[in-house]
Image (tube, rainbow, N blue to C red):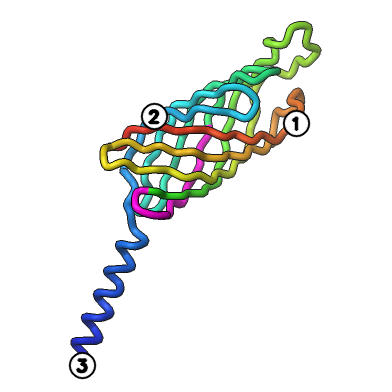
Amino acid sequence: MKILKTLTLFVCLTSLSTVFGQEIADHALGLRLGDSDGFGAEISYQKSISRYNRLEVDLGWRDHSQYNAFKLAGVYQWVHQLDGNFNWYYGVGGGLGNVDFDVIPNSSVDNDGLFVFGAGNIGVEYNFDIPLLLSLDFRPEVGLVGYDGFSDNFDFDIALGIRYQF
């Protein structure tokens, strides 16, 4: 009877690990495209930290209606399986960048320079059987330092990601 209980427990735990566990790729490199008020393009790199956690680092450019900016963002993410090859993830992080207000003709804003922000992240992704990962995510960003010339210090960043996994 003890062997039957042990075998049953082993089967249950093994089944649960396959239900909850689609491992994420060690590395993923690609593009993250989109923004809330214009166009943004970022080179995106993801590195797995553990079986269900990863770090995403994005270096990109923003073409806003009132300014241009370069920025570097880093987000620590927790990844969970939804169904089959679909995952959902959430995370927290931040970054820094450089803004240029000279794109506005006759602008009185003269606060070009460094800015720092905090960010959250939530999204869904599809992990193809080939080494391709597509994602759609939402990254709200809150300005912390250097946001004097911005119309507000809160940004809703929505983007589509396409990455090669290796």
Sequence-earlier tag: 1 or 2: 2
Residue 69 is situated, as x and y percent measured from the top left of the image, at 60, 20
Sequence-earlier tag: 3 or 2: 3
Residue type beneath disc 1:
Asp
- Residue at 39% in and 43% down: 126
Residue type beneath disc 3:
Met
Residue type beneath disc 2:
Gly
Residue 1 - label:
3
Report the quarter where the N terminus lies: bottom left
- Residue at 60% in and 18% down: 63
Secondary structure under the numbered disc 1 in the rendered image:
loop
Asked whether residue 82 is drawn in magenta, I would say yes
Task: Tell me whether the residue at label 1 lies in contact with that at label 2, contact meaning CB atoms closer than 8 angstroms.
Answer: no
Secondary structure under the numbered disc 2 in the rendered image:
strand
Q: Determine the main secondary structure of the stretch shown in magenta.
A: strand
Asked whether residue 8 is drawn in magenta, I would say no
Question: Badge 3, how many Cα within 10 Å: few under 14, some, many 20+?
Answer: few
Residue 152 - label:
1
Alpha carbon distance from label 3 to label 2? 54 Å
Select label 3 or label 1 by which is in front: 3
- The quarter of the picture where residue 165 lies is top left
Report the quarter where the C terminus lies: top left
Residue 30 - label:
2
Find the residue positioned furthest to the right: 108
- Which segment did they paint magenta? 73-85
